[in-house]
Each structure stands twice: as structure tokens, then as C-alpha cells.
Amino acid sequence: MSELTEPRIEQLSPKNLVGKHLHMSLANNRTAELWQSFMVDRKNIRNTIGTDLYSLQVYEPTLDFKEFNLHTEFEKYALIEVSDFNHIPEGMEAFTLEAGLYAVFIHRGLNFQPTFQQIFYEWLPASDFVLDARPHFELLGEKYKNHSPDSEEEVWVPVKSRQSGETVRE
């Protein structure tokens, strides 16, 4: 692969997340609306763990990313990790991210399309893994800079072993 480095394979522990979500497609992209709404209310979340933000997508379990297009609909979430669900601010919701195996890529810059294509059309078909029907997400940490060409984020893609076809979960 040209710009994309080999991913690290990581076993994710379950995460308690709180935030908001919207139904959308790339043709009807409401990401900015979602994040603006979340960031306004983020200060009301009391029991956060760290400052990393989760930009999470839930796709139909049968989605084949070779057929993904501008009109493919999905649920998009803006979330932050919390210690528990004892206090969920009004207008927000709890989301439990289940444990599982992920391929973690580093994306740099503004244009996500080349990263997407390299992950799903180059790396995945040549790897020892297949997609798992769990949420995909980007971890927006300290190197993430909104709308900056210097931005860096982690792209977490749910995978399972191609040989066993089984998901590795805790």
C-alpha cells in the first residue's frame, strides 16, 4: 500500500460510551450537524474517561463494502467514553461498544477516500481477516485537528480471522 501503513491488530475491551447519533448517508451527510450538537452538550457528561472522542458508524450487518456508495445508509455516533451509565445527560444516549478484534489504521490529512479504498480494496482482501459485523469507528485523540491537513486519527475496522470465520471476543 502506498501511504497507508500496516495496521496493528488489537483486541478491544468493552467500552461504555455516551453521546448522540443521526441516521445518514454520504449523500445526506449530517456529520457536522451531529458533532456540533454533541460538542455543545459534551460539558454535561460528568463521568468521562479521558478526552478521546469516538466517531462511530453502525452499518447493516449484511453490508459488503465493495457495494458501499454515497447512498448507503448508516447510523453515525459522536461519543465519549464514560465510567458508567449512572448519569446520561438529557438528549444523549448510552452506547456499549462490545469487545472484539480490530485492525487499527492511522489516517492523516483531510481526504478519507484514499484511506477507505486502501483498507477495503487492498489491505482487507490480501489479509488474513474478513470484516466482522460490529461498529467501525475513528478514535479522535490528541493528534486530531478538525479540518487540518496535519490531523491524525485512528481508524478501527472490526475484523475476524479468515480461517476460523469466528470473532475473537472477551
Image (spheres, rainbow, N blue to C red):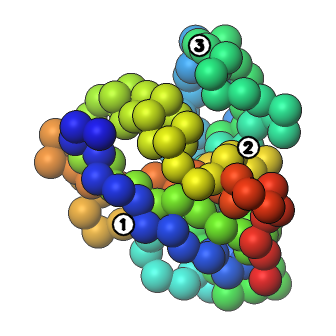
* Residue under numbered circle 3: 70
Give the mark toward the camera: 3 or 1. Answer: 3
Q: Residue at x 76, y 72 (%)?
A: 168
Q: Are marks 2 and 1 in contact (CB under 8 Å)?
A: no
Q: How many marks?
A: 3
Q: Secondary structure at mark 3?
A: loop
| Cα gap from disc 3 to disc 1, whole angstroms | 27 Å
* Residue under numbered circle 2: 58
* Residue under numbered circle 1: 141
First along the sequence among labels 2 and 1: 2
Quick one: quadrant of the C terminus? bottom right
Q: Residue at x 62, y 85 (%)?
A: 47
Residue lying furthest front = 163
Where is residue 103? Give x, y as percent: 52, 59
| Cα gap from disc 2 to disc 3, whole angstroms | 15 Å
Whether residue 46 is visible to the viewer of this picture, yes or no, is no
Front-lying residue, 48 or 99: 99
| Cα gap from disc 2 to disc 1, whole angstroms | 20 Å
